[in-house]
Amino acid sequence: MTEDRVSIPGSERSGPSAKALDWLIEAEPQRDERIEITCICRYDVPTLERKLREIESQMPAKRRYLTHKELKGCAPSEKAFNDLLSFAAEHGLEHLGPRDAHRCDVRLAGARSAVEAAFGVKFRYYRSSSAEVRTYEGSASVPGSVSGVIQAVIGLERMVATESATSPQPAGKTPEAAPPDPAPPASDAPAAARGVRANARAEGALYTGTEISKLYKLPELRGKGQCVGIITPLGDFDDEDLKRYFAELKIKDRPTVTRVNPNERNVMALADFESTLDVEVAASICPGAHIVTYGTRNTQPVSYLTLEMVRDALKSAIFDEENLPSVLSMSFAFPEACSIDRLLGRPCNNDEEDLLNQLFLIAGCLGITICASSGDSGSLSAQGAGWPDLYLCPITVFPAASPLVLACGGTTLYANKGKIREEVVWGRLAQAMVVLFSYSQPFANTPATGGGVSRHYPLPDYQRKAQVPPAVTVTFNDGQLKSIKELAGRGVPDVAANADPLTGWKLVFRGKPAVGGGTSASTPFWAAYLTLINEGLSRTTGAPTRVGWVNPLLYALQIDKKKDVFRPIVKGSNGGYAAAPGLVWNACTGLGSPKGTKLAVALGVSRAIAKGRQ
């Protein structure tokens, strides 16, 4: 007797739209195609949400987070997990171990026909000038005996770049040992409309992490006894670069940096630079902390960074019971829309974002803070029905758009004689920035801090008093105004710090001096700063203490309790949104940049410890 099958909620997919067929052609599958998928197991989300609501208004010293052992009580039972493994074996699917101790997911692989039979789908393949897609129509389904344990399946759909869309290295060549020196900021760059001089180099406005710490008056702590994690889905850093960097900062005791599932270096220069930027910025702010990078063992050039890759690295960090990071930094961003859906011209679903958001929920219950970059292209991100007609749209980026994540924006920082002279929104939309790394095609960017209002995540309670403007969609049809829709969405970012490459961070990359910037710099800064606060809290209470999900506390301190723990940014724009005096929050820099020691004390760190007197 055949067991009844149950559709997996959220797995419904439609075929390409009629418009999409203008740029798509149906393709044949690869012979002997082997498909890898991940079955996401169903956690007790209501219990986790209740736990987060229970602690969100509590100060860090009062919070009691879940232990990893307690968290397993929210996972599927051993029997349910074993039933899932048996189902996979019965359908000829290989379990790509090791066995997940937290019963969070199961990775499987098998022939196309085996995957189709196991999940009740029929794959279809399409090709455009830039990508190939595997998809299906209808819903995926599984036998009723395992329907309760499977929340979703990642990997049934897949998009990869075609050869014409990638930038392979010339045959027979390997990446250069060192790229050309980074181009200096143009000395004759036009001044921004706000009247601030743009000639940052002439003003000497490039900073070390040590100088940034003093400018923001961070606590006089080093992060001792703490661990900060950095999610690096692609690329890796060079130990020799770190050695030289720490020597130039005159850091006597070299920070401990550990790799988990490291990626191969010298595969993607830009990815290597991102990883180097993250580690060097974090290490310069909390040199006494243990820094751990979490990769995906990537060894190939990748044209599309997928949420599945991010999830693998993030899961490794959250469930790391050996290193126990208290803060995680994520310096990458995706528009709030699915690339496959855009290519196929169908309505976007956010299923994979929601699955990643479940990991953020777990992290919050464990007391782990997640910091994510708000993007570097101002208020606009790529959107559209498909690659031939992509357009820019005011849409926020993920993961920063998640209410469970601390979204980090960027500023332009001018200092004089060790004090901040002026800090404004990082927004240089009138200045083209061409980015070039060895053996890759140059690309242009509109350099400005990302920010805006989410169209997927509703306005969270902690932003109710932050004066977040609505997301507005205006529809014209045949020259007539048909509708104006307003949505109260999550505002991005929450906080900010120096990010302008023209007032950037001094680094070492491939043995030479380099300059880092973007919200890829402000994010590890905030992660490292919160790591210092965690050290201060632990020393103050005499027990391990973490800020954890800190968003509600930051808004309450600045807006409700008027503790003046942020420096509001009142000048500048990221294109669609502007800062102005009198706003408690803006969609460029959030609450503002930190008043370092003052915020640490407001969160519960002893003033004597924060000042280095104890």
Image (tube, grey):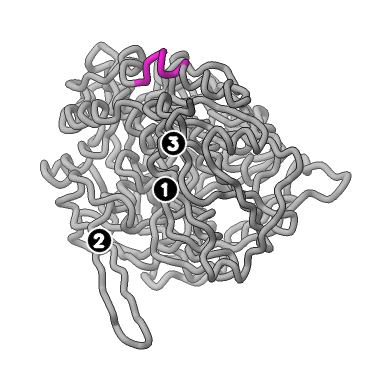
Q: Position of residue 318 (x, y in %)?
A: 42, 25
Residue depicted at 49% across the width and 18% down the height: 100
Determine the residue positioned at 38% across, 35% down.
Answer: 370
Which residue corresponds to mark 3? 152
Mark with earlier residue (1, 3)? 3
For marks 2 and 3, the one nearer the N-term is: 3
Q: Which residues make up the magenta segment?
A: 75-82
For marks 1 and 2, the one nearer the N-term is 1
| Classed neighbour count for the residue bearing mark 3: other residues with Cα under 10 Å, few (<14), some (14–19), many (≥20) | many
For marks 1 and 3, give the one nearer the viewer. 3
Measuring from the top left, give residue 543's x and y in whole percent. 27, 12
Q: Nearer the viewer, residue 385 or 164?
A: 385
Residue 450 falls inside the magenta stretch = no
Magenta stretch: includes residue 77: yes
Q: Amino acid at mark 2?
A: Leu
Q: Residue at the location (55% across, 70% down)?
A: 389
| Residue hosting label 1 | 398
Q: Is residue 254 left or right of residue 458?
A: right
Going by the numbered disc 1, the residue's amino acid type is Phe
Instruction: Determine which of the numbered discs, if any, sits on residue 529 in the image.
Output: none
As drawn, 562 above or below 367: below
Q: Is residue 156 visible?
A: yes
* Alpha-carbon span between mark 1 and mark 2: 18 Å
Is there a contact, CB below 8 Å, between mark 1 and mark 3? no
Judge whether residue 607 can be spotted in this image: no
